Structures are given as structure tokens and as C-alpha cells.
Amino acid sequence: MKITLKGFAENVLFMANAFIIFLLVFGNRIAVPYWLQPLGRMHPMVLHFPIVILLLAMLLEFFRFKDTYAKEKLYHDFTSWLLLAGTLFSAVTVIMGLFLSKEEGYSGNILQWHKWTGVSIVFITTFIYYCRNAAWYKLPVARGGAVLTILSVILAGHYGAALTHGDNFVLEPVSSPAESAKVPLEQAKVFEDVVMPIFSQKCLSCHNIEKAKGNLIMDNAQAILKGGKTGKLFVPGKPELSLLIERIHLPLDEKKHMPPRGKSQLTEKEIQLLKLWVKNNAEMKKKVVDLPATDSLRLLATTFLAPVETPEEKFEFAAADESTVKKLNNNYRNVYSLAKESPALAVNIYNKSVYKPSVLKELSEVKKQIISLNLSGMPVSDDDLKIISGFENLRKLNLNFTNITGTGLKHLVILPHLNALSLSGTKVSYNLVKQVLNMGGLRQLTLWNTGLSEAEVSQLQKINKNLTVVTGFKDDGKHPVKLNKPRLNTDITVFKDAITLQMKHLINGVKIRYTTDGTEPDSLKSPIYNKEIVLSGNTTIKAKAYKAGWYGSDVLVANFYRSTYKPDSISFLLPANEKYRAGGAKVLIDNQLGDYDFNLGKWIAFRENNMEAMLYFKQPVTLQSITLHVMKQIQPYIFPPTDVEVWGGATQNKLHLLGRLRPDIPKKMEEREFIKIEAKFKSQRISCLKIVAKNLKKLPEWHPAKGQPAWLFVDELFLN
């Protein structure tokens, strides 16, 4: 018996339908072997082909009974072949999809809708194919079947897109992002109200109960803590070792960059917040207000929350004339409105050398409108307070570091609205300060660095329990505080001949101890910094601040580089990666060091090619060392080079090897750092240099992206 191609295809279609039914009935008991998984993963690649064929076949089937085409054999046969091919390819696509659905990360209602609409396409079109020549198969059935098939194709495509790209994928570019209601600061929890909304907007489309890509679900705290198939999402307290932070910082064109290209990306503020959250041990239940007031995470989290609403004060007085306010402003006095449409004014007085009581008297024209007056550091006397007592609506008065002694404070008692008074750094006494406690509206009194004892301050607080007395920190030696790091007093870290080391500390009496050999400074043996330290070569400074009664600071690490020569021209023999070309090869000789944010245009990156740079000098120079400044940041695949070669000579055609280095390649996850790779050689005259740095071609087995090429990031060359 001769089997035709069409007959063979029909038999295959019948068996494919039977196999689909088998997979549907016994799917829960079936495990797809590894060698069949690639077939399942071809599902997204082949599904478009049957869609096009079926849509065309259904369009032809819809008009099949029209008088023009009813008796056309070619029309009938062509439609039949299209329908058979489309149905057969649809069956193969469905089988691939059923295999794919058995892998981790696929579950939920959307998957079920996608599966059953896809299966229904095969069953409906198979039914149409085998029945389209029956006597009862008339116009209504043909058109109904065509419409039903097209609707099934549309629905299957919709659910497939939702499964792959998330809900609202099509309209996302033109849709306004849904903003979650901002929670007031005092009620907000760090994870629930600040971190989770970021995950919901930027991660949930791929990591939800319906589609857990990488077996990672991010719609609740427990699932986030569990992590995915590649491990935990983060290491509490260690953002540099956390997968979450690693994937965020990968270059955008990396396959594992999250969110993927085409998805809404995290903002710099969101990235910083997630990093700080992980650094703060990724707390799940802590409130924002439980963090210290100056904590970086709290300060940043506050910007994501609803601002604290304070009832706007209504003022009964009229606004001052604009020309009057303008007239009162000069180089030493600033009079300005506190808010748009508000009649209230604030006044700041500057320059103690030109201050006179008349500066205050001249404000009499707007005395009703002044609610804030700042006289900090001015030579204000007690007599001047009598003038200030005429500012009947004054709410806030700053007299810090003025010349008052307190005898004039009695004049302020008549101010009914004064609620904040600052007297820090003045010579006021307890008995004279006591006068202002009778002011019913006073809520804050600032008295740090005055002659009042702790007992006197405590007594003031007892007299008026509604008053907050601010006295600042007093060092009793019982509660040592950690010093902050020393600071560099210069932005110059690359120099030509020599540079004087400039460091400072903001606290008096602090000793700065330092080292230049890479060891950490101690409080006994390390040399004490003085202003006569001169650096004449590549140097790593490590410095700590020490003071009796205080804990030593963290270590300040500062790298200084000498670069005696600058070539007249520089170029690359092989192109850098197109995304990280910065300003071209000249970036390597601009004496500007980059930081760890490699997206700011200070770094040149190589991945596909090695770095091969040619440097030319119009006049020969005497060289004996070349230093390459590179970055190591293991999580985003940034490794030091495996091999560095330095070639030199009189011309490009007469180069000889001056030196060769093989830097150590990390053998495990390490902290990020900048690395200086220095090649030293015998001093010689050079007109042309060639520097070759070979990037790591395959990441090691222990790296999450093992086998992929590493990135090489270079930002500077130093020639000496």
C-alpha cells in the first residue's frame, strides 16, 4: 500500500493528538529526562510558525463557501494543506510546551490558561481538518470554527506573553506606573513598605506564584528568604556577597542582569536602598523609625514614604508690602517668605563686623510678619533683645554664640508665640534662663556649650515638663564614642613629581597615625601624621584617628600614584566594548581615577578583545616602570587580567619585550578593590610603547557564571 505525504502527515497528526492526551492525563506522574529538555525549551522558538499558518488557514476557511471559491479545487486543496501543516506544527508546539511546563518555575493559573487554550487550538483544528468534507459541515460551522480557532490563538498568545513577560507587557510602555499608597513614616516598616514595593514593581512580573523564574518567588517575605535554584537571594549584612546585589550591578547586556533588558530598570536610589537594606541585615519586621535618626537607610527610606504632614499654621496678619521686603534685603540681611502665599517672613543676619542694633530697628516695618530670626554668631547684646521683643509674632529665635549674658531675656517673656529659643555658646546663667520658662508657648530650649551644669539643666526640665532642653553630647569618659575617619584634604591623587600628604580631622586633639606598607595603623607604633610628609612614588596610605577616651576610627585607605610622563597620543589596536568606551583611549592618561560605579564614564572595558594600547612620544622618554590601574569586582564578572605584557622601542616596528606579569586570579568570592599592576624594567629610552592586558576568557568553576568571559576594566596608566 502506497502512503502519500499527506497520508503520512495525517497519521502523525493522529498520533500527536493521542500523545497530547496521554501527557494531559498522566502529566503529573511524568518526569521529563534531561536529554528531552532542550526540545521543550524550543517551544518559544517554533510557536510563531504555526500561528501564522493557522491564521491564514482560518481566514481562507472563513470564506470557503463563498460562491467565488466554493468550486475552486486549488482554493480547497491549498486550504487543506495549510490547515494540516498548521495543526501538525501546533501539535508539536503543544508537546514542546508540555515538556517545558514540567521544569521548575512554571505554575499557577496563567500557565493553566495558556496550556488549555494551546491544547484547544490543536483539538479544534484537528476536528475541522477531519470533518471539513462532511455533508453537515456548512457555512455556519466553518465560520464558527474559524472564529473559535482565531480567538483561541489570541488567548493562548496573550497568556503566553503574560507568562513570559508579565502582566500588562504590551501596554506597559504607555501605561502610567501604578504607585502604591505611601505610608506615613511613623507607621512604615522597612521591608513591607519600602523594599517590597520595589520588588513588586520591578521583579514580580517574572518571580511570582504563576511564573517563578529560576524557582524564585518574590511576593512574600518567606519566599524571598528561601531564595531560588541558585541559592539565597542575599547574605544579611554582606551586600558584596549577595546574589541580589550582584545581578543588579551586572552590565545591562548580560543575560543574568536583573531586571532583564526590556523591563523597567531599578533607579540609582532604589539600588542604593536595596544595598543598604541588605547591609542592615535585611530586617523583615523593623520599623523605619526604629533605625537611628542619622542612619543612611532611614534617611533614604524616608524619601519613599509619605511626608510627615504638619498642619499648616494660619496667620491672622496681612502680608508685608513686596517693595518693603525688597528694600530690607542687602548683603548682610536676608528677608524672605517662608512659603508661597504665606505672609510669614524669616530673617537671617550675617557679617558680625557690620552688625549694629539699627539692623534690627530697620525691621520694624515688617515686625508683625517676622516669625523666624537668626542672629547666630552676631555681637547681639542684652539691650538688643528689647528691640526683638517688638516682633510680636516671632516663633523661632536663634541667639547662639552671641554676646548676651541673659539679663535681657526678660524682654522676651512678652512674646506669646515664641516656641524655640537657642542660647548655645552664650554666657547665660541658670537664674536668668529660668525667666523664660514662664513662657507658655516655649517648647524647645537649646543650651549646649553654656555654663549651666547638668543638675541645673535637669532642674529646668523639671520646672517645665513640656519643654525639651537640648544640651548636646557631653563626654564623661564612661561611654566612649567611635571617631570618624580622617579626611584627605586634597582631591589630587595622581601627581607628576611629588605631593605633600594632606589629611585632617574635624575633632580637636585627634592624632592621625598612618602606614605606607599596606599594614593597618595602630595607636602605639605607627607614625603620627604631620604636614611635612612628602610622597614621591606610588603609595597606599592607611590612616586611623585616635584620641584618649574615644574608640579609634575605621581605616582610611587612599592610593596615590606618580605619573611622570604623558604620551603625545594613545590608541587601541582592538576596540573596547561598545558600552564602556568612555571618552576613548585618552581616558587612560587623563589622571582621573574612577570609582566603583563603572557606568559613570571613567572606565574602559574589554570582554570580547584583549586590551592592546599603543602609546607614542614625539621625543624619547626614559622609562623604568608602567602601572596599570584596574578594578576587581567579582560579582559583576570584573576580574584582573591574566597576563600583562609591556613592549617598547624606538618605533612600532622595533618593539621588544620590556616586562611581563601574571597577576593573581581570585580563587573565591572576594571584596571589591582597585588593583595596581606595576611592571618594572631596566631604565631605557622609549618612543613607542605597546601594552597588552589579556582578560580572563572563562570564569572559574566556583563563579555563578562559570565558563563565560570576564570583564577587564581599566581607567588609568602611569608611566615613570
Image: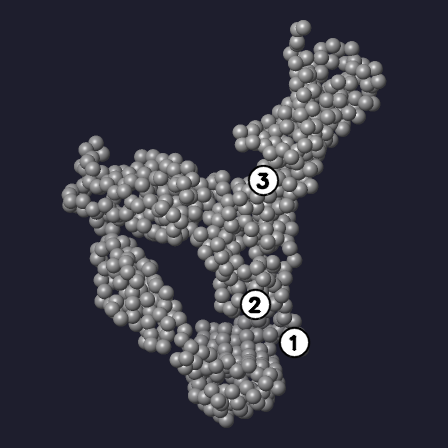
The relative height of residue 428 versus residue 585 in the rendered view (above or below) is below
Badge 2: how crowded within 10 Å, few (<14), some, or many (20+)? some
The spot of residue 214 in percent (x, y) is 55, 42
Badge 3: how crowded within 10 Å, few (<14), some, or many (20+)? some
Task: Give, as a three-letter code, the residue at label 1.
Answer: Phe
Q: Which mark is residue 315?
A: 1
Badge 1: how crowded within 10 Å, few (<14), some, or many (20+)? few
Q: Tell me which numbered mark, 1 or 2, is placed earlier along the sequence.
A: 2
Q: Tell me which numbered mark, 1 or 3, is placed earlier along the sequence.
A: 3
Residue 534 appears in which quarter of the rendering?
Answer: bottom left
The relative height of residue 86 versus residue 542 in the rendered view (above or below) is above
Camera-nearest residue between 679 and 206 = 206
Camera-nearest residue between 566 and 180 = 180
The spot of residue 326 in percent (x, y) is 53, 72
Residue under label 2, please give it.
Answer: 289
Residue occupying the far top of the picture? 1
The spot of residue 151 in percent (x, y) is 73, 31
Write the residue at 39% across / 53% down.
671
Residue under label 3, please give it.
Answer: 104
Count of marks placed on residues: 3
The quadrant the N terminus occupies is top right
Measure how far apart labels 1 and 2 are at the Cα level: 32 Å
Write the residue at 56% across / 67% down.
289
Write the residue at 43% across / 83% down.
449
Write the residue at 67% across / 40% down.
110
Measure how far apart labels 1 and 3 are at the Cα level: 65 Å
The spot of residue 297 in percent (x, y) is 51, 62
The relative height of residue 332 versus residue 409 in the rendered view (above or below) is above
